[in-house]
Image: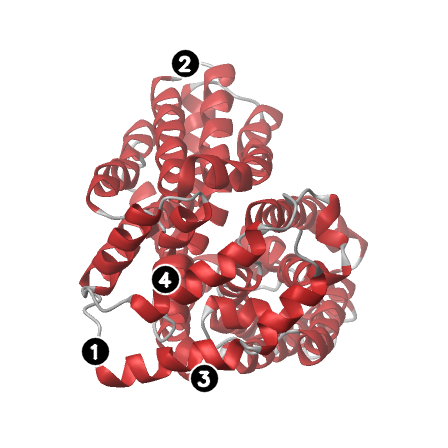
Amino acid sequence: MVTNKDIDKREDRGQDYRAPLILQDERRKENNIMVYLSTFVAVCGSYSFGTGIGYSSPSEAAIKKDLNLTIAQYSLFGSILTLGAMIGAVASGPMADYFGRKGALRISSIVCIGGWLAIYLAEGPVPLDTGRLATGFGMGVFSYVVPVFIAEISPKQLRGLLTAANQLLIIAGVSISFIIGTQLHWRTLALSGLIPCAVLLVGLFFIPESPRWLAKIGKPLEFDSALRLLRGSDDTYEEAAEIKDYIDTLEKLPKATVFDLFQRRYSRSVIIGVGLMVFQQFGGINGISFYASSIFVSAGFSADIGTMSYAVLQVVVTTLNALFIDKAGRKPLLLVSVATMALGCLLAAASFYMKTYQIALVAAPALAVTGILLFIAGFSLGMGAVPWVIMSEIFPINIKGTAGGLVTLVNWAGAWAVSYTFNFLLNWSSYGTFLLYAAVNVACILFVINLVPETKGKTLEEIQAAINH
């Protein structure tokens, strides 16, 4: 039985056995073609995630008319996606641990295909809601498994960039669905949701499984083969030895349960992972993004111009985040991101305060749109992608499935809570709502400064040993 003291000794030796990896990086340049291909295949799941989110807005009027749905029935259709995602979040960790990362992606793709076909064929609310629930389940699984898979296959110098591509493809899926949804019939739009799922299913036959998962389940030959294929080289001895050493040590510990996550050894990882997801959602992103059009209208600004500016800005800044996350680091991006979000909320609050009390009404619309666009620019710069990057890095592989499922569930539960309460808060106080979100974002700044580590340029084993020491 391995004790905490044994593991602490092994962690103290970390610099000795990790040093060859630095020399290895200097001796050769890795061929990362298979890493890029594997990432492309995986983020098809992220794009599918985005198409699910972006489907309901442009198709609302046509579905209600064709199927004669009431507002309440369509509201259920829209919101049941989140319920499916929460179920998928709970299942995602155990699925990824039992079936493997590729197996979990394959299953969720098949479920999503079934969901989109049910929506396409629907002649009433029951099959429509069933299909939406199924696509939500797939999204919940994708939201955890995609960033974890990418983090586990990527070399440390590319891990931030490639994991951030997850968020970029989600945003791309939302934006493209919104745009083409204005031109396509809602049934045709549902069929278009099959494309990324089909690409993912086919692509999985051509990429390797996560080497770390293969090592964890005791398949050394498959592990060595997958790692060599991903690195484009047979010279993977040092990296393979580090991964095996760390996993062998962790595997001697008892199998983790949800209650084990709250042990002192893992508590910091759990606090960081859960905390970032809580702040990501309760900072107001889903309320603001779901109701951006109505916010612009309420402030007296053109909804069309505001929404288009919002969508373009989100894609551009998320792309910049992916390009700079491995250069600027995770923590600086988070701090700049959250500070910008807080400032955006304050500007929006000032605008609605001015409108409520009839002060400088000419300036209020411009102030509101500036605040909302500043908020979404800040979110896209860091808080959109970085929490998922960090989540994929900080949990040791023996608790990754359980912890990842918990963190993803917290994220989706927060998304539902914020989107559900947003209109109630606006009715209570429009400017008070944005002041509340600003306060949450200020609290997030303190959280990041005091608890969140910098993970740039470190192997997963180095990160996890340092956090859980």
Label 3 Cα neighbours within 10 Å, binned few <14 / some 14-19 / many ≥20? few
Q: Could you tell me which residue is drawn at 45 percent across and 36 percent down?
A: 138
- Residue 154 shows which numbered tag? none
Q: Amino acid at mark 2?
A: Glu
Question: What whole-number distance in Å separates the C-alpha atoms at marks 3 and 2?
Answer: 51 Å
Question: What whole-number distance in Å separates the C-alpha atoms at marks 1 and 4?
Answer: 22 Å
Q: Amino acid at mark 1?
A: Lys
Depth check: give the residue in front, 376 or 408.
408
Q: Earlier in the sequence, mark 3 or mark 2?
A: 2
Question: Would you say the residues marked 2 and 1 are in contact, meaning their CB atoms lie under 8 Å apart?
Answer: no
Foreground label between 4 and 2: 4
Question: What whole-number distance in Å separates the C-alpha atoms at marks 1 and 3?
Answer: 22 Å
Q: Quadrant of residue 265?
A: bottom right
Q: Could you tell me which secondary element the residue under label 1 belongs to?
A: loop
Q: Earlier in the sequence, mark 4 or mark 2?
A: 2
Question: What whole-number distance in Å separates the C-alpha atoms at marks 2 and 1?
Answer: 56 Å
Q: Amino acid at mark 4?
A: Ala
Q: Quadrant of residue 366?
A: bottom right
Q: Could you tell me which residue is drawn at 62 percent across and 26 percent down?
A: 72
Left or right of residue 239: residue 15: right
Give percent across and percent down for residue 431. Answer: 74, 66
Foreground label between 2 and 1: 1
Q: Where 385 sits versus 146, above or below?
A: below
* Observer able to see residue 90: yes
Q: Earlier in the sequence, mark 2 or mark 1?
A: 1
Question: Would you say the residues marked 4 and 2 are in contact, meaning their CB atoms lie under 8 Å apart?
Answer: no
Question: Would you say the residues marked 1 and 4 are in contact, meaning their CB atoms lie under 8 Å apart?
Answer: no
Q: Which residue is mark 3?
A: 328
Q: Earlier in the sequence, mark 1 or mark 3?
A: 1
Q: Which residue is mark 4?
A: 165
